[in-house]
Image (cartoon, grey):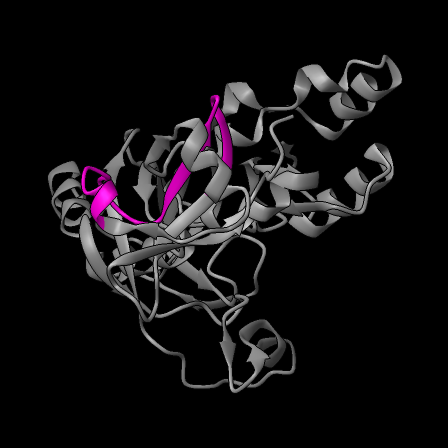
Amino acid sequence: MWKERGMTSHDCVFKLRKILQTKKIGHTGTLDPDVDGVLPICVGRATKVVEYMMETGKAYVGEITLGFSTTTEDSSGEVVETKKVSEVPTIAEIDKLMKKFEGIITQVPPMYSAVKVNGKRLYEYARNGETVERPERQATIKKFIRSSEPVFNENAGTVSWRFEVECGKGTYVRTLAVDLGEALGYPAHMSDLTRILSGTFKASDCVTLAQVQEAVDQAEIDQKLFPLEFGLKELPAVEISKDVWEKVKDGAVLAKSDYQDVASFPFVVMYQDRACSIYDVHPTKPTLLKPVKVLRNQES
């Protein structure tokens, strides 16, 4: 789906359940209401692979603004600190510091986030005007680059520029903007964000809610749906024989030694080009592989 601004990810799922007339729908990674972009949705049997799709990388385009910070670290929050930009950072300074954020970094999740502390989500504390110690988290940043010239607003005392970022799961791009601003000596916030990639799904793959409704009305919804296998492309896959299929369909364990060529675990077991199970190393018997998710146990 292409999630439009003004909706939560849950809103999308709620509306899709009505449009598609099924309860078995889930999304694969929350997008804030002010953020638009790629939001993969799993329908029916595909809901079994949500957790694996959430592990995939993401890519965004957005804007950073120096000069003030907000409660939410984006443009929707209340201003908490202001420091007018008196000297615009040079392009060389910006690019050098952005480069330093690439790799494995440590982030402190924003108060307005869904991270749980003592069984309560951070945004619940924030809405009650409370603060709590937030656990540090590691994030992987594959690319973080400036994609436009910095624009200085003399009246507002702000500087803004566009950026591109490719990152691993659980990255807070808002916090990336705030931390970059701090490194440049100014309070900052993420003033715009769009997700352009989520795992194997890109913007050109997406449809809006209105387009889904139109497809249903015209009995063409099947043309908008991707096969379950498309959502598992990030995992290694192994095509099995008829003999192995007879075991796999009944949930049998497999010898790990028979799958030494698999690049990493877990992996997808394929039969006749269809995903039937996801196998991983047995938790107590390291020489064996066990099914952690059964996707299909029939040939049709």
Q: Which residues are magenta?
A: 257-277
- Residue 243, quarter of the rendered image: top left
Which residue is rendered at x = 40% and y = 49% of the image?
279
Does the image show residue 247? yes
- Residue 214, quarter of the rendered image: top right
Side of 285 relative to 253 (left or right):
left
Whole-percent x, y for residue 172 in the image: 40, 56
User: Number of callouts in the render?
Assistant: 0
Which residue is rendered at x = 86% and y = 40% of the image?
18
Whole-percent x, y for residue 132 in the image: 47, 86
Side of 163 relative to 52 (left or right):
left
In depth, the one of 53 and 276 nearer the eye is: 276
| Quadrant, the N terminus | top right
Which residue is rendered at x = 65% and y = 25% of the image?
300
Side of 23 relative to 178 (left or right):
right
Q: Is residue 277 above or below residue 101?
A: above
Q: Is residue 193 above or below residue 140?
A: above
